[in-house]
């Protein structure tokens, strides 16, 4: 009964939140000036595999705060190590984690691999057109793929734009050539095999430790590869020199949003990313029917380089945007409502 009351309360709150029409939201897109900005061309366009990273190299890139959250030890690392309530437990857990990292490294359990692609790109409405690395910059060039995007529709003050990721890519009709990046990284399947062996020996603590560390290593690899992309492969921040805490606070230029997360909540867009990079063929990550990645310690997403690019959440969207999105994707409205269910700002019609 309490859950039903909470559902009703939340539904009522969402119903009261005003949504802009899609047309109005598009008018309020991010007002970027493409006449005074020259997007940086990559130093190394195309697709390539990164397989020269070791666990030792990844350790400085680990964000430990989510690791402790996974164990329900709350607080921000490293401050929580001195917390009067959880500090002693946190220090013990960290020592065990460091010891397990030594084992994962020594026994070569983890096999970090990544694939990165940098492609010409132009925005068209709320979507991004992706072209072959050697494609002509002419608007008539045939795109390799379309990244379908969603736009914020919740009501804001007039001075705050209604964002879509496509806003950070030069429009097709601007005459400005832009680029986008794609990536996928994995810690490999070895950690899952080790965790299964530990579970078979009833060592659940060590098994959970391995899984949590594999996730952290995959995120650390995503951080390291993004840094290399900014400083080498794309090269738009070749003089960047940030400490690990600055990387965790995302003090660099550019963003790497992931399909299925707030700025691009449609998980099926991973399919486009995987096809562009041949992720399965190159580094062995597979997609399930529900677009989860296997091995689980894997991360994928897009790179945007515009200096004003920021993370955001699409939030609730209206039926008009769902219908427009379904038409662009070649879906029925019902399919779109199923995949975008967490973002619907209305109650879907019941099937007849």
Image: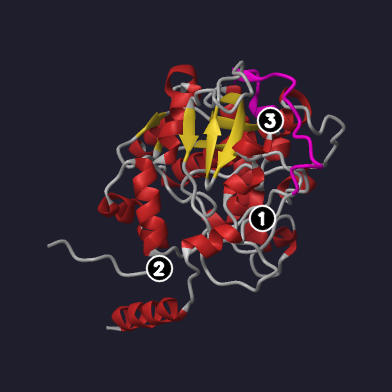
Relative vertical location of residue 224 with respect to residue 42 in this rendering, above or below: below
Q: Please say if the residues under marks 2 and 1 sit with CB atoms less than 8 Å apart.
A: no
User: Alpha-carbon neighbours of circle 3 within 10 Å: few (<14), some, or many (≥20)?
Assistant: many
The answer to which of 148 and 304 lies nearer the viewer is 148
The answer to which of 296 and 199 lies nearer the viewer is 296
Give the CA separation, mark 2 to mark 3: 35 Å
Considering the image in quadrants, where does the N terminus appear?
Answer: bottom left
The disc at residue 177 is 3
Q: What is the x, y in percent for residue 6?
A: 36, 80
Query: Counting residues from the N terminus, which is met first, the one under dot 2 or under dot 1?
Result: 1
Residue at (52%, 69%) from the top-left corner?
A: 154
Answer yes or no: is residue 50 visible: no
Can residue 53 be found in the magenta stretch?
Answer: yes
Q: Quadrant of residue 351?
A: bottom left
Which residue corresponds to mark 2?
345
Q: What is the secondary structure assignment of the residue under circle 1?
A: loop
Considering the image in quadrants, where does the C terminus appear?
Answer: bottom left
Answer yes or no: is residue 276 visible: yes
- Judged by depth in the image, the label closer to the viewer, 2 or 1, is 1
- Judged by depth in the image, the label closer to the viewer, 2 or 3, is 3
Which residue corresponds to mark 1?
30
Query: Counting residues from the N terminus, which is met first, the one under dot 2 or under dot 3?
Result: 3
């Amino acid at each position: 009964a309490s859950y039903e009351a909470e559902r009703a309360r939340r539904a009522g709150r969402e119903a009261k939140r005003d949504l802009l029409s899609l047309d109005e939201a598009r008018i309020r897109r991010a007002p970027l000036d493409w006449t005074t900005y020259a997007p940086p061309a990559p130093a190394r366009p195309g697709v390539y595999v990164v397989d020269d990273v070791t666990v030792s190299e990844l350790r400085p890139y680990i964000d430990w705060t989510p690791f402790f959250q996974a164990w329900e030890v709350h607080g921000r690392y490293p401050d929580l190590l001195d917390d009067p309530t959880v500090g002693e437990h946190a220090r013990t857990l960290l020592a065990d984690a460091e010891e397990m990292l030594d084992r994962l490294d020594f026994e070569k359990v983890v096999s970090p691999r990544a694939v990165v692609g940098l492609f010409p790109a132009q925005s068209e409405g709320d979507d991004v057109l992706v072209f072959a690395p050697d494609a002509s910059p002419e608007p008539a060039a045939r795109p390799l793929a379309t990244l379908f995007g969603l736009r914020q529709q919740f009501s804001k003050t007039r001075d705050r734009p209604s964002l879509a990721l496509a806003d950070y890519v030069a429009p097709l009709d601007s005459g400005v050539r832009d680029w986008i990046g794609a990536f996928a990284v994995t810690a490999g399947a070895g950690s899952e095999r080790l965790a299964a062996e530990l579970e078979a020996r009833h060592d659940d603590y060590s098994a959970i430790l391995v899984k949590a560390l594999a996730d952290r290593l995959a995120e650390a690899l995503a951080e390291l590869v993004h840094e290399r992309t900014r400083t080498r492969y794309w090269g738009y921040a070749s003089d960047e020199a940030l400490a690990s805490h600055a990387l965790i606070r995302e003090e660099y230029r550019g963003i790497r949003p992931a399909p299925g997360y707030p700025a691009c909540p449609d998980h099926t867009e991973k399919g486009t990313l995987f096809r562009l990079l041949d992720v399965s063929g190159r580094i062995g990550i597979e997609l399930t029917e529900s677009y989860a990645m296997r091995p689980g310690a894997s991360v994928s997403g897009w790179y945007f380089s515009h200096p004003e690019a920021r993370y955001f959440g699409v939030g609730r969207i209206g039926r008009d945007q769902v219908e427009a999105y379904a038409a662009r994707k070649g879906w029925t409205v019902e399919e779109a409502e199923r995949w975008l269910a967490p973002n619907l700002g209305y109650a879907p019609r019941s099937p007849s």
